[in-house]
Amino acid sequence: MARVELVMPKMGESIMEATILKWRKKPGDSVELDEPVLDIATDKVDSEVPSPVAGTLVEILYQENDVVAINKAIAIIETEAGASVSAGSSTSAPDTASVQAAQVPYVPAVTAAPSAVQSASGRFYSPLVRTIAKEEGISQQELDTIPGSGQDGRVTKKDILAHVASRGKGGAVQAAPQAPAAPVAQPAPSVPAAPAVSVSGNVEIVEMDRMRKLIADHMVMSKHTSPHVTSFVEADVTNLVNWRNRIKDSFKKQYGENITFTPIFVEAVARAIRDFPMINISVDGTKLIVRKDINIGMAAALPSGNLIVPVIRNADYLNLAGLTKQVNDLANRARQNQLKPDEIQGGTFTITNVGTFGNVMGTPIINQPQVAILATGAIRKKPAVLETEYGDVIAVRQMMFLSLSYDHRVVDGSLGGSFLRRIADYLEQFDPNRTL
């Protein structure tokens, strides 16, 4: 009999740990090669971990809701092979959870992250949390004061990042001063507390799922980080709509893909970003990080009602057929919870299609650390004034609103408004005689 270690797989360049959501197998169960053994979650995406071998699961080393560092053994599988497989076997590291994780050695990085330890207070801190604490100059005493939202009050990544953000706004935890004899007025907190909610009467209390909690934290953080401004334009997309209606059947026959409006929007945005590269940036303190790659995220609705943002990389280098294939593939796999962690990272600009829900416009929240996000509204037939050589006429046209939310720290009204207008221009000037 051989004993094979199933290890926590590497889920992306920036991900150092994952949470065990659910064991699909229990000790004593047989497993097939590539059969899912457990489900794990990071702050980016949920994934299945398949078995690298066929055999019997004989030992589970961590329980559900435990946070485990990557490359750490999480279970033992016994096989019929003649020799045991060491966790230190020499192979290359995997990119996703679908590779044979049992053969992956633990190779520490050049700058090793702190190991997971318990403090003197008895609290457990993961390697990622301790790394962030070290980088941010957070002492052990201060770390022990951070409220934890994880299992048994454990401090998670979002907890320590929220604490770091609070420090930046003057809300760092300090040693408590001696209380005065008489009560004195206290300054208002930088972030007001949420009002108390009454739970009396005919109500139902539903706990947020894990993804909704992450989305909520991300949205609140974005509003606290960036002063949002939203600009609007209305675009006449009649030529674009007529072209798509005319070619959609032949496009499907030629490329095997249904063409929607989304790849056309992505194409126009990528062209506009080339014209206005200072939209394609991030902010690091007082420095501007200008992104040379144009990686466009597209918000996709999940069956649960949550949203996820897969990324089309180097969108400016893809033709319309390539963009259509990428959009359809990412959207389909998003709905089936089959996205890889790297496919929802690295975006430099985001598009959200509020028109999908019949909305004509929206004021979207910036997807940090980006500085702008575009909302595309529903396309509706409306009367519009057209200028002709014979004078102005009123005609029925296909119209839509575009709205751009941008970070007013670094994007002023001139840049934001000009960029938005350029997107509308590209859509309005769409060639109705364009060939496939």
Image (cartoon, rainbow, N blue to C red):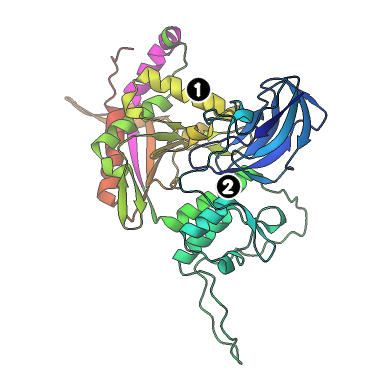
- Which residue has dot 2 on it? 214
Query: Of label 2 and label 1, which has the lower sequence position?
Result: 2
- Which residue has dot 1 on it? 329
Position of 26 with respect to 83 (left or right) is: right
Where, quadrant-wise, is the N terminus in this rendering? Answer: top right
Range shown magenta:
231-253
Point 69% across, 58% down: residue: 153
Whether the magenta-drawn stretch holds residue 247 is answered as yes
Q: Secondary structure at mark 1?
A: helix
The percent coordinates of residue 198 (x first, y second) are 71, 61
- Asked whether disc 2 touches disc 1, contact meaning CB atoms under 8 Å apart, the reply is no
Point 28% across, 52% down: residue: 412
Q: Is residue 146 visible?
A: yes
Q: Amino acid at mark 2?
A: Leu
Q: Secondary structure at mark 2?
A: helix
Q: Quadrant of residue 183?
A: bottom right
The percent coordinates of residue 16 (x first, y second) are 55, 44
Point 47% across, 16% down: residue: 258
Position of 206 with respect to 155 (left or right) is: right
Q: Is residue 375 visible?
A: no
Q: Amino acid at mark 1?
A: Asp
The percent coordinates of residue 158 (x first, y second) are 56, 53
- Say few, some or many: other residues with alpha carbon within 10 Å of mark 1 (under 14 / 14 to 19 / 20 or more): few
Pick the front one: 347 or 103:
103
The percent coordinates of residue 233 (x first, y second) are 33, 40
Pick the front one: 227 or 202:
227
Direction right: furthest residue: 28
Pick the front one: 337 or 304:
337
